Image (tube, rainbow, N blue to C red):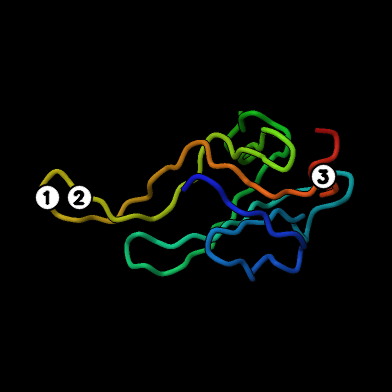
Amino acid sequence: MRDLQYRVGIGFKTELEVGECTIYRHDASTPEAPVWIFAFRFTRNTDGKPETRRLPINPGTDAPGDPSRGWGLKRVSAGRWQVTPSIKCLERVVGDDGKKVDVETWHDNVEIVGVPDDEPWTKGH
């Protein structure tokens, strides 16, 4: 996994296609202290089924620092943001004994592409 195509709009929280992602404000958050959720959809390497994962994020941070505060997002260039430090997907790999096992594999340097400049979470970055 290298890039995830950004899909605009809070209505897409649960309607993502494989390879798409979105960022939306958590329903219980307040405008003064928003909680942002990063949702992405991928195909599991284990059984070929699509899966959506949701992570709390801190837009504009290079690294999450305190893991309880979530992941960070770093602006790379116009329309491109990098998820830091990494995200994990369910994959099937060959173990030391030669058998296939399902593991959660971390993907580093994943970028979100196609992000409009007017998204609320991008303000000030």
- Viewed as shown, does residue 53 lie left or right of 69? left
Q: Which mark's residue is nearer the viewer, 3 or 1? A: 3
Mark 1 Cα shell of 10 Å, populated few (<14), some (14-19), many (≥20): few
Q: Residue at x 75, y 59 (%)?
A: 8
**Amino acid type indicated by mark 2:** Val
Residue for badge 1: 98
Please identify the quarter of the rendering in which residue 43 is found: bottom left
Mark 3 Cα shell of 10 Å, populated few (<14), some (14-19), many (≥20): few
Q: Distance between the residues labelled 2 and 3?
A: 42 Å
Q: Do the residues labelled 2 and 3 touch (CB within 8 Å)?
A: no
Please identify the quarter of the rendering in which residue 124 is found: top right
Residue for badge 2: 94
Q: Identify the element where label 1 is drawn.
A: loop
- Residue 117's tag is 3
Q: Distance between the residues labelled 3 and 1?
A: 48 Å
Q: Which residue is drawn at 84% across and 48% down?
A: 120
Q: Identify the element where label 2 is drawn.
A: strand
Q: In this view, does 11 lie above or below 125?
A: below
Q: Do the residues labelled 2 and 1 touch (CB within 8 Å)?
A: yes
